[in-house]
Image: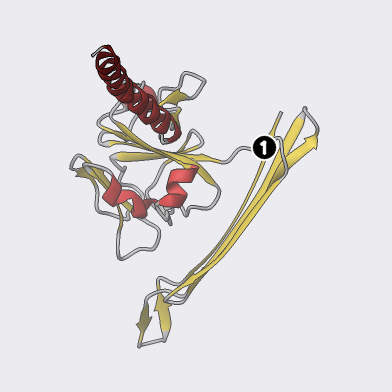
């Protein structure tokens, strides 16, 4: 009888320990599966903050997330954000028609101020032509919904789109890309970054070229509507 009681007690103890072991295993798995921390600079505090800690209606993507989304340009992100339409005006290449919470314009006339401001490394893009940036050399994107006049001034009644390019690193890095699509449209880019003076000065040189043959042919003179060739060279130093 004593042996039976001891056996039963051992069984109860083992059954009690099983949930604890399972909980510890689940916690360890949760740690391994934690999402990447996305940082933002929208509050202009001089340092990056966790996107979950800022008191703003913001959607942000880091470089790894943009790559996972197969990000091509800003219009590629429209379907991932609530109340945000990052579209282009079909009659003019690379001209933005951004709308956030229903506020936007549908015009390529430079004298008409946009209601959604676009900022690249803190510099405001004053007109909506040429702001449909490719994924070239982009480190992160932040989209702020709602009026942002307190921090960003005028022309941000609907919201703001902030782009951060990659800063020079302390280790040597090189990346490149060749791409093509119907049209035809050919894209090539190359970026080289690394230390110039170890621990003191780092530099980066990035170059991008896009040769777009357009999408319509004018039968009167055989010209291609929307044809464009774009070359960007972006140097940077950090010390």
Residue 201 sits above or below residue 151 on the image? below
Query: Which residue corresponds to the image point at 25% horizontal and 36% vertical from the top-left?
Result: 158
Residue 111 located left or right of residue 185: left
Residue 15 sits above or below residue 76 on the image? above
- Secondary structure beneath disc 1? loop
The residue tagged 1 is 169
Residue 75 sits above or below residue 59 on the image? below
Does any portion of residue 24 appear in the rendered image?
Answer: yes
Query: Most extreme residue toward the front, as rendered?
Result: 1
Q: Position of residue 66 (x, y in %)?
A: 44, 48
Does any portion of residue 36 appear in the rendered image?
Answer: no
Q: Position of residue 5 (x, y in %)?
A: 25, 14
Query: Which residue corresponds to the image point at 42% horizontal and 74% vertical from the top-left?
Result: 214
Query: Which residue corresponds to the image point at 45% horizontal and 27% vertical from the top-left?
Result: 41
Which quarter shows the N terminus?
top left
Query: Most extreme residue toward the top, as rendered?
Result: 2
Q: In this rendered view, identify the residue nearer to me: 223 or 96.
A: 96
């Amino acid at each position: 009888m004593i042996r039976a009681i001891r056996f039963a007690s051992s069984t109860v103890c083992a059954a009690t320990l099983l949930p604890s072991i399972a909980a510890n295993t689940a916690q360890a798995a949760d740690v391994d599966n934690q999402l990447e921390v996305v940082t933002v600079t929208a509050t202009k505090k001089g340092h990056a903050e966790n996107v979950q800690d800022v008191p703003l209606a913001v959607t942000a993507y880091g470089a790894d997330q943009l790559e996972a989304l197969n990000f091509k340009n800003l219009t590629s992100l429209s379907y991932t954000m609530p109340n945000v339409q990052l579209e282009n005006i079909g009659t003019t290449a690379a001209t933005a028609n951004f709308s956030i919470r229903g506020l936007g314009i549908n015009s390529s006339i430079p004298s008409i101020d946009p209601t959604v401001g676009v900022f690249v490394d803190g510099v405001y893009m004053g007109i909506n032509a040429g702001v449909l940036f490719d994924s070239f050399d982009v480190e992160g994107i932040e989209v702020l919904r709602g009026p942002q006049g307190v921090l960003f001034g005028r022309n941000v009644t609907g919201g703001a789109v902030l782009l951060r390019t990659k800063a020079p690193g302390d280790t040597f890095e090189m990346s490149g890309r060749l791409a093509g699509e119907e049209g035809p449209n050919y894209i090539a880019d190359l970026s080289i970054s690394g230390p110039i003076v170890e621990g003191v000065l780092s530099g980066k040189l990035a170059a991008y070229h896009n040769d777009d043959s357009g999408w319509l042919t004018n039968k009167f003179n055989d010209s291609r509507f929307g044809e464009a060739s774009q070359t960007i060279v972006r140097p940077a130093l950090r010390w």
